[in-house]
Amino acid sequence: MDKIRKKKFWNQQRLTITGGLAVFILFILYAFVFADKRSRLNVETDRLTVSDIKKGKFDEYVILQGVVQPLKTVRVDAIVGGHVIQKLAEGGNMVNEGDVLLILENQNLQLSFLQSETEASRLVNDLQNTRQRLKVDKFTLQKNLAELDYQIAQASEVHLRNEKLWNGKAISEAEYNRTKRDYERLARQREIEVQSQKYQEENSHIQINQLEGTLNRTEKNVGLWRKNLDNLAIKAPISGLLSSIDVEIGSNISQGQNIAQIDDLKGYRVRAEIDEHYVSRVFVGLKATAEFNDQKYPLLITKVYPEVRNGRFKVDFIFDKNVPQDIRRGLTLPTYLELGKSAETVLLPVGGFFADTGGNWVYVVDASGTRATKRNITLGRKNPEYYEVLSGLLAGDKVITSSYNHFGNKEVLVLK
């Protein structure tokens, strides 16, 4: 007889359904818990620059474009104004100290000089006349005193004689008093004459001193006017190369106007501009190296200009030892300015990525070469070739160093 068989719970259909549900649940768990949810972007590798991170010697320096200038440049300015009547030198030629470069004409200056000379001549004549008058007055005084002394002597004799006669009652008192008054009048007149002549002499000396002072000042003025006339001939203050002279015959020159420039060729300096980022690290005495004709020449900073314009400031270098042969004004020399000592460190090549990340992170390529992942890093010093890596990267890592401009904020790049 047939037996009743119990129906199995885990039949084929239920096993299939349960298995499907388990797979679905595992897929959901993986999608929400274990799957990589980071944003991605597909990128073609031929548009990227991938650089190797390595460990090596880091030299901190800045490449500058130094311009050769004379060690000393002298500006030639017009001491007096005028218009050019002769031009005796041209730019680009050598000149010696004292050579005449230009001759100016200034009629007002010449007229003032003539007037000053005329005034000086008049004062000389006045001084001579005053001194002559003083001598004449002295002779007149001597003559008048001699005449008075003669008259006083006569009056004295008459007075003394009449005094004896009056005492003997030989003449009247009126006669005696008359001769006495005559004598006293002459004596008093002599005193007045002496005082008057003394006053006139003192006054003449005062006039002479005043005239001498005025004449001295006038002669100094004449000397200044003459010197100004001499300055109409503009001369080279030093020997050297007349690098520029920016006037022509007939040009009007103002007082103080710059006319020319002379370069002293006894030495040279190199002037360069540096980014203001380094302003606190650049100082007098810092070393540099310049290249000229495939040779290197050591330099030293001698002057740092504090003014910053357009994000840059200027420095002057001198050649520390040898000056290159055939060097001349205006040449541009590649100059390497050393900012610190060499050190062993992890090196990251310089690239366009820094403009997009500020050096805070980079894309690091994995071992398979198919993906690049964002990684935070810390950078230190920089030279024209490398950044100093302080943390986040190790030697052997590969980093995308080209621009990240088109990557947005994607965390993973899929390389194709």
Image (cartoon, rainbow, N blue to C red):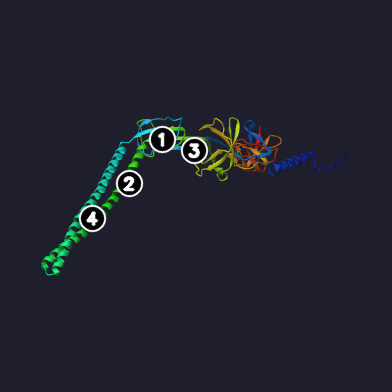
Task: Give the structural element (helix, strand or loop) at label 1.
Answer: strand
What type is the residue that disc 1 sits on? Lys
Residue at the (19%, 55%) spot, across then down: 147
In screen coordinates, is 371 left or right of 154? right
Pointer 2 with pointer 4, Cβ within 8 A: no
Query: Which sits earlier in the primary sequence, circle 2 or circle 4?
Result: 4
How many C-alpha atoms fall within 10 Å of the one at disc 2: few (<14), some, or many (≥20)? some
Residue picked out by circle 3: 72
Residue picked out by circle 1: 235
Q: Position of residue 26 (x, y in %)?
A: 73, 42
How far apart in space, not on screen, are marks 2 and 4 (Cα)? Answer: 28 Å
Residue picked out by circle 2: 216
Numbered disc in front, either 2 or 4 = 4
Numbered disc in front, either 4 or 1 = 4
> Which image quarter is the N terminus in?
top right
Query: Which sits earlier in the primary sequence, circle 3 or circle 1?
Result: 3
Numbered disc in front, either 2 or 1 = 2
Task: Give the structural element (helix, strand or loop) at label 3.
Answer: strand
Residue picked out by circle 4: 197
In screen coordinates, is 224 left or right of 161? right
Asked which quadrant contains residue 368, the reply is top right
Numbered disc in front, either 3 or 2 = 2
What type is the residue that disc 2 sits on? Asn
How far apart in space, not on screen, are marks 3 and 2 (Cα)? Answer: 40 Å
What type is the residue that disc 3 sits on? Lys
Closer to us: 367 or 223: 223
